Amino acid sequence: MNCYLIRWVAFVWIVNSVPCAFGMVVSEQTGGVCPSLSVEDYRFSDVLDRPLQITGFDLTEKFLLRKGTVTEDLPSFRLGSSPLIKPTKSIFPDGLSNEYSLVTIFRVRRTTKKDRWYLWQIFDQSGSSQVSVVVDGDKKAVEFSSQGLLKNSFRYTFKSRDLHALFDRQWHKLGISVHSDTVSIYVDCTLAEKKMTDERDSIDLNGRTLISTRVEDGRPVDIELRQILIYCDPYMAEMENCCELLEPKIQCGVNRTFIGTSPPLVTAQSPLMPSQPTSQSIDTCHCPGEKVQ
């Protein structure tokens, strides 16, 4: 009997170890699987403990296939000429955790600094928005919207004066930390505003996901983008630093990349120069009635 028990325990241990062996981490919030994410170690503050395993999704890679200014370590992309929309299952094959961080580096252009546009949106098969982040240039605000457990919609508008910098046509890092009951907005690695939120429903993998799209007509928005990441950890937005945005443009370390294992010492790459390259962005978006907070 003891022999069978030992074999069963060993079998369970092996099964539970498989995701880690293949660079995957099981999400406690959804039961889904988050892939390991290769990120530059200069991105993180050395005063905060980083997780041993960084997981998430590189939407820059998913949508833009890393084409851009090849002379830059982290190229920038000129968007605006073609839609950026894909089946949600191709972006998040096993779903998205209920808690996560979204971190992006972008700059608006003269012609679009007053536009109202989706930085990111997921909508279901019927066209109902499930989660979205809207950048509103006219009101100089950022909105986070989500779908509740009863399929009702909630919208949280962030209007801190710290958000005004996002519309000055310079490069900025926007971080959004999504916890089960709060959403926090970071501008250039500084907390700008935090709001309590309602409980959210899980996303429908049979829908579609888009980035960089005007709310008004669903057309591509003319911005420049360096990167847009979603970490399967709500604390990662807080851990990011802004070394790559420093002025004057000095080198703040040596660029290294890590995937999991123990976090290395924090270093950095030399800042990036503006570029022009490839284009892209979206078609129509559908939004139901929303509860505004």
Image: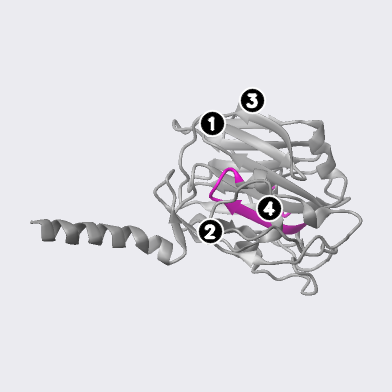
Q: Quadrant of the C terminus?
A: top right
273 sits to left or right of 122: right
Give the CA distance from mark 4 to mark 1. Answer: 24 Å
Question: In front here: 204 or 236?
Answer: 236
Rendered position, 284 above or below 21: above
Percent position (x, y) of residue 98? 49, 42
Residue at 83% across, 66% down:
276
Q: Nearer the viewer, mark 3 or mark 4?
A: 4
Task: Identify the element where label 1 is drawn.
Answer: loop
Q: Quadrant of the N terminus?
A: bottom left
Q: How far is disc 4 from disc 2 in space, using C-alphas?
A: 24 Å
Q: Quadrant of residue 187?
A: top right
Cα separation between marks 3 and 4? 32 Å
How many C-alpha atoms fall within 10 Å of the one at disc 1: few (<14), some, or many (≥20)? Answer: few
Q: Amino acid at mark 1?
A: Asp
What residue range appears in magenta?
217-235
Task: Check residue 293 in the rendering and tell me which mark sits there, or answer none.
Answer: 3
Q: Visible in this render: residue 221? A: no
Q: In the figure, residue 77 lies in which quadrant?
A: bottom right
Specify few, some or many for label 2: CA neighbours under 10 Å numbering under 14, 14-19, or 20 or more. Answer: many
Q: Are marks 2 and 1 in contact (CB under 8 Å)?
A: no
Point out the tag, 3 or 2, that comes first from the N-terminus. Answer: 2
Callout 3 environment at 10 Å: few (<14), some (14 to 19), or many (20+)? Answer: few
Mark number displayed over residue 181? 1
Whichever of callouts 2 and 1 sits on the residue coming sooner in the sequence is: 2
In the rendered image, the residue lying farthest to the right is: 248
Pair 2/1: label in front: 1
